[in-house]
Amino acid sequence: MENRSTNPATQTAIFAGGCFWCMEPVFDSIPGVLSVMPGYSGGFLPDPSYQQVCEGETGHLEAVEIVFDPSRVSYRELLLVFWRNIDPTTKNRQFCDYGPQYQTAVFYLDEEQRREAEESRDEAQRMNLLGAQVLTEIRPASEFYPAEEYHRQYYKKNPYHYQRYHDGCGRNWRLKELWGEKKG
């Protein structure tokens, strides 16, 4: 599958990092990122709903689709941010969220992204302080389905609830344990 961006001056990246609510603000804050859309990718059911994905029967992962300006931020830089904001050593889980929809993955859109994703995975394996095996999958991109409107920019629409969830999930503690610094 080729890079899906309709503007030749932009590129697209798709990352599954557990709860898309927590991945959206991480990428929104990066200069050169033009948009971040939460949604679902990697499954077999067309146009799944949040409820269907949460039931774990569609094969989809919660993911974010990032449109970026490669003259301002590289795909490799986005990969580094991705790794530093997930726990790549768990399967079907991210922090306090459990289920197959929370598996982490990099969905590549072309062979260059595949190569960079695999190299970055190997680097993440060397960098994580615990030395545990990296279980994040590198997969070819499939159809990306945007999440329902109420999930988009959730951290801005519901800041109190989002912050309680984010803090209560143990995310910052685990990221510090894995990577040695506070991220997320």
Image (cartoon, rainbow, N blue to C red):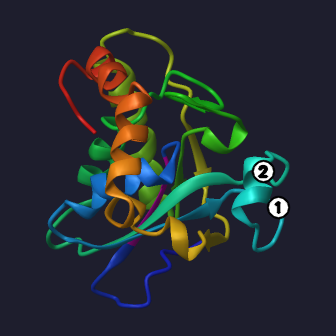
Q: CA distance from mark 2 to mark 1?
A: 6 Å
Q: Residues within 10 Å of mark 2 (few under 14, many from 20)?
A: some
| Left or right position of 54 against 39 | right
Quickly name the residue at label 2.
59
For the residue pair 64 and 5, the one nearer the viewer reads as 64
Q: Main secondary structure of the magenta part?
A: strand
Percent across and percent down for residue 166 are 38, 39
What type is the residue that disc 2 sits on? Answer: Gly
Q: Where does the N terminus fall, quadrant-wise? A: bottom right
Quickly name the residue at label 1.
44
- Which segment did they paint magenta? 12-16
Q: Is residue 15 magenta?
A: yes
Percent across and percent down for residue 68 are 29, 72
* Residue 180's disc number: none
- Dot 2 lies on which element? loop
| Left or right position of 69 against 134 | left
Q: Quadrant of residue 44?
A: bottom right
